Amino acid sequence: MIDSFSIAIVGAGNVATNLALSLFETGVTIRSVYSRNMENTHVLATQVNARAISSLAEVHPDVSVIVIAVSDDEIGHVAHHLQSHSALIVHCSGSVDINVLSGCKNYGVFYPFVVMRKAVRTDFTNVDFFIEANDEIHLSLLNTLAGKLTKSVKTLHSKARLALHISGVFANNFVNLQFIIAQQLLNENGMDFDVLRPMLANYFQLLLQSNPATIQTGPAIRHDDRVIQKHLELLGSHSDFKEVYRLLTAQIQQLPQQ
């Protein structure tokens, strides 16, 4: 059982914090926490009754899993310092290939497909976890570990996981940028973002029940050039917003008619 294992957490940011706290609450022992920021390390270690360590060399030799939850660029660097460890070493990135860990004895990927923030606890119950490992034994271990947090655990190889990550960037990160632009335009014209919330609530409810291609609306899909021109004029000196508007309009107009 995974309860008999102990794990180490590398990182103390958004992902590391949410995973550590949630795993700890399920009864998994967090033996140690390491990050480059010792203040953050001590805070997280205290929350999960773990030892705050100041070096990767201090990771206990008997931990069964080492979770690397750091920035993508740092994963390979961290893994290099853990190559002699016998634990299953996993990273939590959507865009980094499993092979970045191939210098380690046992390795895998433990990827929760959700946006996380330290200030807001993540409920992993219905979050998809995508896992990958260097062999079936360690894949089974990751399946058990993820199953402590969620009802949905899926095996996914690195190339498909990268495609999933890109889709998330389009669906979440890029869409949120549009909200930021909308908020600025509303504020400049004496309105608040709250005026959009009922419309957005209706849209997301519809999206959960529909194919996105069937619910595209607006002047672009209607080829309403007069409205499009008015919008561009209203954007005035916002040349960057105009560029986004023109690009997205062109993309929408290339969609096949539903």
Image (cartoon, helix red, strand yellow):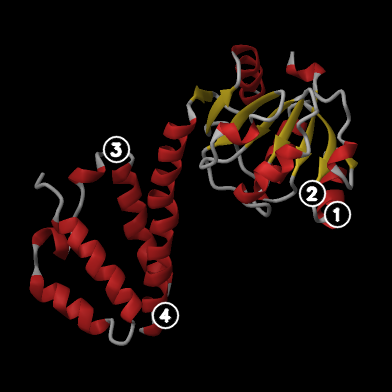
Q: Residue 253, how many percent across, how many down?
A: 14, 58
Q: Is residue 158 above or below residue 122?
A: above
Left of 250 or right of it: where is 64? right
- Looking at the rendering, which quadrant does residue 23 occupy? top right
Q: Which residue lies at the image location 67% right of the left edge and 54% below the top edge?
A: 119
Q: What kind of element bears circle 4?
A: helix
- For residue 209, which numbered disc appears in the image? 3
User: Which amino acid type is marked by label 2?
Assistant: Ser
What is the spatial separation of the Cα atoms under label 1 and label 4, in whole angstroms? 40 Å
Q: Are marks 1 and 2 in contact (CB under 8 Å)?
A: yes
- From the image, tell me which residue sits under label 1: 38
Q: Residue furthest bottom?
A: 237
Q: What kind of element bears circle 1?
A: helix
User: Which amino acid type is marked by label 4?
Assistant: Asn
N-terminal label among 1 and 4: 1
For disc 2, the neighbor class at 10 Å (few under 14, some 14 to 19, many from 20) is: many
| Of residues 258 and 36, the one drawn nearer to the viewer in this rendering | 36
N-terminal label among 2 and 4: 2
Q: Which residue lies at the image location 59% right of the left edge and 13% below the top edge?
A: 136
Q: Which residue lies at the image location 73% right of the left edge and 42% below the top edge?
A: 78
